[in-house]
Image (spheres, rainbow, N blue to C red):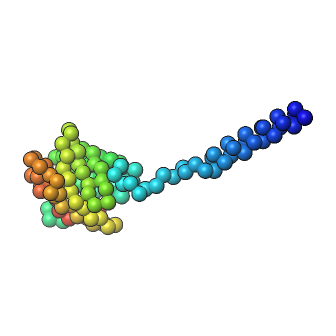
Amino acid sequence: MKNTINLFLIIASFAVIGLVFVGCDNNPSDNDNSTNDNSTKFEGTWVRQSDSATIVFKNNTVNVANGTYVGTFTYTDTEITFTRQGNEIYFDYTLNSSTLVLTASSKNTGEGIAGAEQIQGTFTK
């Protein structure tokens, strides 16, 4: 009888462990794009149509005009933020497969206004 109970407990333990693995979500939702979990949507070199200036996105870093501005970026569905040495520049953006339009956001203050105005534009990949 004791062996039967021990066997039942072992089987029950494996069943609980199996259910835990089945119930775990190994692919978290991409609903919150405020982190860089999906930063590859910007990945690559983008060239501004008006003057051929470039923005290069790689992982969560951004490099504007060959090193003129190098920092990190985060984004939501409608806004992208460049951060360098604790200073942030905000842009509203639209993105399709080969065109990125950056528009200086009204959230910019101080030096961020001038920085955003210099960077904004329509870029193609």
**Residue farthest toward the right in the current orientation of the protein:** 1
Q: Position of residue 31 (x, y in %)?
A: 41, 57
Q: Percent x, y for residue 16? A: 69, 44
For the N terminus, the quadrant is top right
Image vertical order of residue 96 relative to residue 107, above or below? below
Q: Along the horizontal axis of the image, is 27 left or right of 18? A: left
Toward the viewer: 114 or 4? 4
Q: Give the quadrant of the C terminus.
A: bottom left
Of 49 and 116, the residue lying toward us: 116
User: Would you say 122 lies left or right of 28 here?
Assistant: left
In the rendered view, tell whether residue 26 sits above or below residue 97. Answer: above
**Left or right position of 73 against 87:** right
Q: Residue at x 23, y 49 (%)?
A: 82
Residue 79, position in %: x, y? 26, 57
Residue in view at x 78 percent, y 37 percent: 9
Residue 14 in sight in this render: yes
Tell me what residue is drawn at x 34 percent, y 52 percent: 34
Instruction: Answer with the quarter of the image where residue 6 lies.
Output: top right
